Image: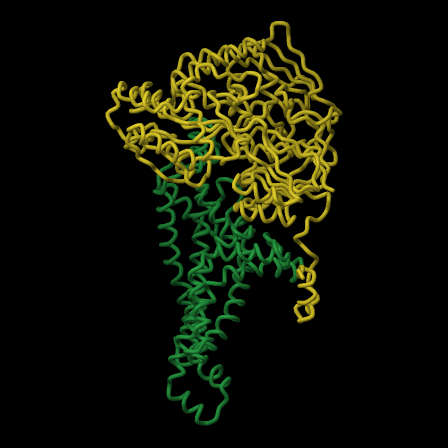
């Protein structure tokens, strides 16, 4: 197992190299000019040109790429063109809010989605099943920002239960941390809940039709035991897979959620960087995101071995 | 019964949520009266007012850095860091003496050498600064509090240049910082203004914090725009960046923020319905909408084509698209200058005043020999002002009989592409939309749009001998009448040659909680004198 994990970690290196090359190349050919944004609307063309030169943007592609890549190999993601701050520092400032949001979303989504997926499978064909599936269709159909605005309107402005915006670190208390994140987590998790609930239901339906379930029933095993000890465990591999895939959905959704709830996370940082064409920051963020994604997939593979002992690497 | 947040928390405690014992104090109340929570117009992505000339950088900089002079609400420069100045009889030598006791945030005194270095850096980037540099013979520190500026030609606008509000402002920095290349970013944010920048709390794109500078020495005169005693009644000013206007609106309504610099016009009726919120015009000098034409390439290298477009537009259409139906927010203006300011002139602006005259415009276009070349119209979709203007223009051009190549893109791309002098079909452009702050257009100090000196002019590179003659006259003018004449001449020549096409004059709103007092209108948000109850 450890050699497998080690091998997978090593395999991430070429993946990251390819990602780095593509990101750099795409940004090179993409339209837009950070120097023009920095200089401001009133700047003269000559001023813009001088700023471009001072940022090194007038140098050839290979020179720029090799310089950036060499630094990357040393763990240096470069310096933001706009703030003058190291990219690693900018990303570091934003990691906690995004991680908190994603963690709470995953906990919330799994806690809600798996039981209701199981329930829908158990009560298949009934109004409970249809109701749960209807809600999951809504979850898929309604954009994150609409859910966010609706939650914000009812629970913050009308009822005054939660703040409208912002993030407070867990270091200042669990309560304030939680109350700032609960609405964003629900908004972000809505589609995720729908996805997990549907997959759980589908795989549970398949498992519940297996012979060993009938045998368990014949032996007089209780319904809860059948559902959660036998069926769910055997249905877990696809569910774990979709939870893993869903992390990518969360990264995309976090961009919107963080804007709607003014959470200073990585999603907003990404948008800001793209709008301003802050190349080093965009490159750093994409490298970090792709690394996280590779890591999540590795974790999913490892979890397979825990939920299904037949899987061995 | 309406269940409030406290009840919910109590209920949650009963259910065991609070059993952890770590439910914190309410974090989304407005908090201390000594802390101001302000949502600026844009993200403070960098903090060098000379290197980056965005308005948001200027607005934040006025808290941290002080100026030698500052204009008041009559646009007259007043002494700020300077105690006295003296101009020689021939107008060639200026001697400035600093107020005693001025200190930077690191505790070091403000010296004449700091001013010399700061002026030198500023003058490399500012249009008026560049003019001064061109006639500068010597700029030296005489002693710790006195510096001398020797020119080869009199410059009557000297004090205005040092106190103007348009970007870049001549902020005074310590010499070691001011010696940074003007095209590179500074790395320290030490000023002598009323607030110090909390660098350790800066999260670009999210938060910028300013803390009171205890050793700041305000002037004794009452605060008036950039001039007078800059007395801040807060220990801490938090700039909270909110990219989403709906979120900012909700946060203002819920009391999580105190002041929002630039609410969308669409949200104003909603904010006005809230009894705890005050809404007013942000800047009495407003903004001038504009579309720039590329004078280098067909079809706009032909003055008759430019005049035909000028004749065809309706400023009312533009203004309704930009700021809506609230007629208090806009007016027609056949001028390159700011309405209701002393030098304003509509001389030569008949086409815009009468417009739209579509039939006459079509006739003129036919006379011009226009052969149906496509007009590459760059429209930034990520900005509501440029987007609205672009859509109106495209419609006007089509009705006029022109072929439109509508390039819907973002501001970053417009910023790059407008710098290209290539033909429109080869990566260049035919027109783009923007707007100019009224504060910049009240004089020629920052009015880059109206300059028509060909290659050296702003994007579009117009050439107009009449405009440039008027510009020279204004910079040399020493009386108000002479200045007025110069402005009238510039407007006439600029309209005749169609340097660019103004699409109207519009205001924007600002909104704040009613427990704030002392907020005044101005080209930038003034924090001096504002109090929170």
Can residue A92 be seen in this snapshot? no
Task: Tell which of A51 and A267 is nearer to you.
Answer: A267
* Residue at 54%, 49% in the rendered image: A89
Where A130 falls versus B340 (above or below)? below
Quarter of the image where one finds residue A30? top left
Task: Tell which of B80 and A109 is nearer to you.
Answer: A109
Quarter of the image where one finds residue A160? bottom right
Where A260 falls versus A195 (above or below)? above
Can residue A215 be seen in this snapshot? yes
Instruction: Provide residue A64's location: percent of width, then percent of height.
Output: 39, 42
Instruction: Provide residue A206's location: percent of width, then percent of height.
Output: 37, 80
Q: Is residue B48 left or right of residue A302?
A: right
Tell me the shade of chain B: yellow
Instruction: Provide residue A97's location: percent of width, then percent of height.
Output: 56, 56
Q: Quadrant of the image for the C terminus of chain B? A: top right
Task: Check the image and name the residue furthest to the left.
Answer: B371
* Residue at 43%, 67% in the rendered image: A195
Tell me the shade of chain A: green
Task: Tell which of B278 and B431 is nearer to you.
Answer: B278
């Amino acid at each position: 197992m450890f050699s497998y994990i080690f091998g997978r970690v090593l395999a991430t290196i070429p993946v990251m190299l390819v990602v780095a090359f593509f990101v750099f190349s795409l940004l090179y050919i993409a339209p837009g000019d950070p120097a023009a944004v920095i200089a401001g609307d009133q700047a003269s063309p000559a001023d813009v040109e001088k700023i471009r030169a001072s940022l090194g943007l007038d140098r050839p592609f290979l020179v720029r790429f090799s310089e950036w890549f060499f630094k990357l190999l040393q763990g240096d993601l470069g310096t933001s063109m706009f703030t003058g701050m190291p990219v690693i520092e900018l990303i570091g400032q934003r990691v906690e809010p995004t991680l908190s949001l994603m963690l709470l979303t995953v906990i919330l989504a799994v806690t809600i989605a798996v039981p209701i997926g199981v329930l829908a499978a158990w009560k298949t064909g009934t109004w409970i099943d249809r109701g749960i599936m209807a809600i999951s269709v809504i979850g898929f159909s309604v954009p994150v920002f609409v859910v966010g605005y609706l939650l914000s309107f009812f629970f913050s402005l009308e009822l005054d239960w939660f703040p409208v915006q912002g993030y407070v670190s867990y270091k200042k208390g669990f309560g304030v941390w939680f109350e700032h994140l609960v609405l964003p987590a629900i908004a972000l998790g809505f589609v995720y809940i729908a996805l997990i609930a549907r997959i759980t239901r589908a795989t549970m339906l398949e498992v519940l039709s297996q012979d060993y379930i009938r045998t368990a029933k014949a032996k007089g095993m209780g319904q809860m035991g059948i559902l959660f000890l036998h069926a769910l465990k055997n249905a877990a591999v696809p569910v774990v897979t979709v939870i893993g895939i869903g992390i990518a959905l969360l990264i995309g959704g976090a961009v919107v959620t963080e804007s709607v709830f003014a959470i200073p996370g990585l999603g907003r940082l990404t948008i800001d960087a793209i709008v301003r064409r802050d190349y080093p920051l965009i490159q750093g963020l994409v490298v970090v995101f792709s690394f996280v994604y590779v890591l999540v997939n590795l974790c999913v593979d490892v979890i397979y071995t825990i939920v299904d002992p037949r899987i061995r690497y | 019964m309406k269940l409030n947040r406290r009840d919910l928390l109590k209920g949650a405690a009963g259910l065991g949520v609070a059993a952890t014992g770590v439910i914190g104090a309410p974090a989304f109340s407005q908090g201390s009266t000594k802390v101001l929570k302000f949502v600026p117009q844009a993200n403070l992505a960098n903090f060098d007012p000379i290197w980056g000339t965005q308005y948001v950088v200027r607005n934040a900089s006025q808290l941290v850095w002080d100026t030698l002079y500052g204009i008041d609400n009559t646009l007259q420069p007043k002494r700020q860091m300077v105690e006295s100045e003296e101009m020689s009889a021939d107008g060639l030598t200026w001697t400035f003496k600093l107020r005693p006791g001025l200190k930077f945030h690191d505790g070091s005194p403000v010296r004449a050498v700091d001013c010399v270095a700061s002026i030198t850096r500023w003058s490399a980037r500012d249009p008026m600064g560049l003019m001064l540099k061109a006639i500068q013979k010597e700029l030296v520190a005489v002693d710790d509090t006195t510096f001398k500026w020797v020119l080869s030609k009199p410059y009557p606008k000297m004090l205005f240049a040092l106190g103007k509000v348009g970007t870049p402002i001549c902020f005074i920095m310590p010499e070691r910082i001011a010696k940074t290349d003007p095209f590179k970013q500074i790395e320290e944010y030490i000023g002598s203004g009323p607030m110090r920048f909390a660098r350790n709390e800066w999260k670009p794109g999210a938060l910028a914090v300013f803390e009171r500078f205890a050793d700041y020495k305000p002037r004794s005169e009452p605060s008036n725009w950039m001039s007078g005693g800059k007395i801040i009644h807060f220990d801490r000013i938090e700039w909270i960046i909110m990219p989403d206007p709906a979120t900012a609106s909700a946060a203002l309504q819920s009391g999580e923020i105190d002041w929002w610099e630039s609410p969308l016009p669409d949200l104003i009726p909603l904010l006005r319905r809230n009894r705890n919120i005050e809404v007013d015009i942000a800047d009495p000098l407003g903004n001038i909408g504009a579309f720039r034409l590329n004078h280098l390439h067909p079809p706009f290298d032909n003055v008759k084509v430019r005049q035909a477009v000028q004749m065809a537009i309706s400023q009312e259409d533009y203004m309704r698209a930009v700021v809506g139906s609230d007629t208090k927010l806009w007016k027609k203006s056949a001028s390159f200058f700011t309405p209701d300011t002393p030098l304003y002139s509509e001389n030569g602006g008949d086409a815009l005043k009468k417009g739209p005259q579509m039939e006459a415009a079509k006739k003129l276009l036919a006379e011009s020999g226009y052969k149906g070349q496509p007009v590459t119209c760059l429209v930034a979709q990520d900005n509501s002002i440029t987007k609205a203007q672009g859509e109106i223009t495209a419609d006007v051009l089509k009705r006029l009989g022109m072929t439109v190549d509508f390039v819907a893109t973002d501001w970053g791309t417009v910023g790059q592409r407008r710098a290209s002098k290539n033909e429109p079909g080869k990566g260049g452009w035919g027109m783009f939309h923007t707007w100019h702050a009224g504060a910049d257009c009240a004089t020629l100090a920052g009015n880059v749009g109206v300059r028509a000196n060909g290659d050296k002019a702003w994007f579009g590179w117009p050439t107009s001998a009449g405009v440039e003659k008027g510009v020279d006259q204004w910079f040399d003018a020493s009386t108000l009448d002479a200045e007025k004449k110069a402005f009238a001449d510039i407007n006439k020549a600029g309209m005749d040659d169609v340097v660019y096409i103004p699409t109207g004059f519009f205001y924007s709103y600002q909104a704040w909680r009613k427990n704030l007092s002392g907020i005044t209108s101005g080209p930038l948000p003034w924090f001096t004198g504002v109090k929170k109850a």
